[in-house]
Image: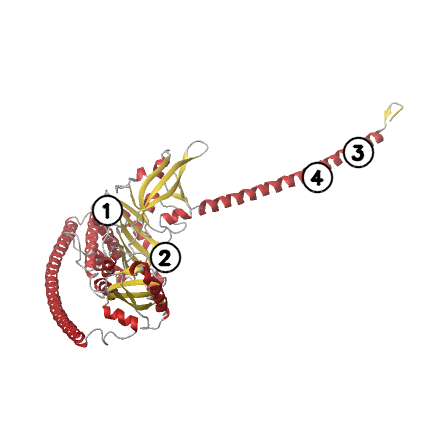
Amino acid sequence: MFLEGQVNWMWVLAGLAVVGWLVGLIGLWLAISNRSRHVDTSDQMDLAQRVAEESEKRLFETVYAIPVALVETDKNGKFVFANRAAHQLLGRRDAELIGLRFHSATWGITFPDGRPVPPDLLPSARALRGQTVKGFQHLLANPSSHKTMLVSVTAMPIKNELGQITGSTAAIVETEGLQTPDPLPVKPAADGDALTRRVFEAAASALVVVDADGRVREANQTALLVLGRDAVDGDFVDLFLGEDERVEGRRVLRAALIARAGGAGPILSRRDGEDGIRWSILPLSDVEGRVDALLLAGERALAGEEAAAATGSSPADDTVPEGPVKAREAALRQDAEAARREATEALATASSARAEAAAARAAAAKALADAEAELEGGRRMENVGRLTGGLAHDFNALLGVMNGALDMMLRQADDPARVRRLGQAALAAGQRGEVLTRRLTAFSQGDDAPTSRALDAAALLRGMESRLRALAGPGIDLMIEGPSVETPVRLDPVAFEGAVKALTRNAVDALDGKGSVAVRLEALLEGGVRLSVRDDGPGMDRDVAERAVEPFFTTREGAAGLGLSQAYAFARQSGGTLSIEAAPGHGAEVSITLPMAQAAAAA
């Protein structure tokens, strides 16, 4: 490459070009190989992500379908997960538990001895404080089925990588169902069956019922006396016939199973003395007309009857004289007629006594009804007087506020701000008087004043929370739940507030200062809104529930008996319905179902 000490740049440039091409080819090969590895790695990552998602989905489906109730809460105690078994155990629909607290989602959480469990001692609350709870047992009442259960709860905290508690998880297992099942109705024996049984036992003849194989199924007291035993079990032929009579006895029994009605011959046995016993046979058929049993009636047989049976002649021919037989028949007829007359007289006497007892019961019932009506009238007049006095007191206080405010306004007319405050106080007093007036008009028939308009019932309920908690007091665990979305209902806001307060006051009064009350507003799938107020008090029976909406009806001493009447009037004026679900010892729930605003306007 060197000629006469000079550099041949042509060759130098050619060498550099070759090196450049080699470097480019190597770089292209490396790029292609790295790209294929990158594509393979990306595909593997996508596959791993899909496998992880499938595994997570299967895990969620497995946990959701597991028959043990599993729940998870956040650090504030609200449910963030609950499987199907948990919803069924707590009486809620799917996904309805999400966002609720454990204490507000169930009813009647008490210790096994009946003492209420404080909220801070519940397993989930203790787990949020870092404790691990194993096998905590308490009673739980399912609000939908009203079934009381003994459950065992195991709870533990959920911590992040820094050791901070972010929530809790719990497993709830039903250990014992405490709901007493209703006893199966005992079908009383029919009068005819009882009478037949008494006749069977009291018969003077020995009566024995045998099956198709000749085994004794029933025997009355006379048959047991003939046999000399307290009970009988075995073959009729072996028990009641002699050894030389058994072959003939079995033949007669087999013939009686296929003989026509009245065609079965008797069995004569001399085992019980010289005269012996004559067993008459009557076939017994089942519902399909097949003979499946035989009734044998045993009577003391005369010697002439055995001889007649042996010779085939009638015993009245020459063995028993005709005169004594007729005399005996006449005596029997006289005895039967006398017994019939005595029975008729006894029936007449019993009928007369029955009529007198019925008249006495009717008179007593009428006297009791009159006394109750008089007592109820006195109670109603007392309640009317109490109501009138209360209203007079309220109106007197309101008029005092209004008169005082107007007097101050006239004296301080030069102070506009003072006059405005006094005017607002007078206006508030007047509005309160309007509320009291509407409470009275709610009881009148057809008083549907055109004051209703489409409003958000959920917003109205949220605005009443502070007043409802003040009404409940510190000893009542008041839970208020409402939908977060708008629920337009056509109603009178003053009447709505009065109805909610009346139902809440009734529930609080039923608890005597200690217990739980839940006020809940929910939108129904079929349309409409349902407002429900439930307490865990003593409840009420069916008779009390049927009369609960009557004005002035009450079971508490000193109460006016107007709360449910006011709620019923509000439901009727708003185009809705009121229902009561209650049982003694299981609390009570009063629900008002209202139509949506569009449906109410159309109605």
Q: Amino acid at mark 4?
A: Ile
Which residue occupies 25% across, 59% down? 570
Reading the image, the residue beneath label 4 is 32
User: Relative to 247, does residue 522 appear above or below in the rendering?
Assistant: above
Reading the image, the residue beneath label 2 is 524
Q: CA distance from mark 3 to mark 4?
A: 23 Å
The disc, 3 or 1, on the residue closer to the chain's N-terminal end is 3
Seen from the viewer's position, the closer of residues 251 and 479 is 251
| Percent coordinates x, y for residue 383 in the rendering | 13, 56
Pointer 4 local density, CA inside 10 Å: few below 14, some 14–19, many at least 20: few
Q: CA distance from mark 2 to mark 4?
A: 63 Å
Q: CA distance from mark 2 to mark 1?
A: 27 Å
Q: Amino acid at mark 3?
A: Ala
Callout 4 secondary element? helix
Q: Are marks 2 and 3 in contact (CB under 8 Å)?
A: no
User: Relative to 178, does residue 28 appear above or below in the rendering?
Assistant: above
Mark 2 vs mark 4: in front: 2
Q: CA distance from mark 2 to mark 3?
A: 83 Å
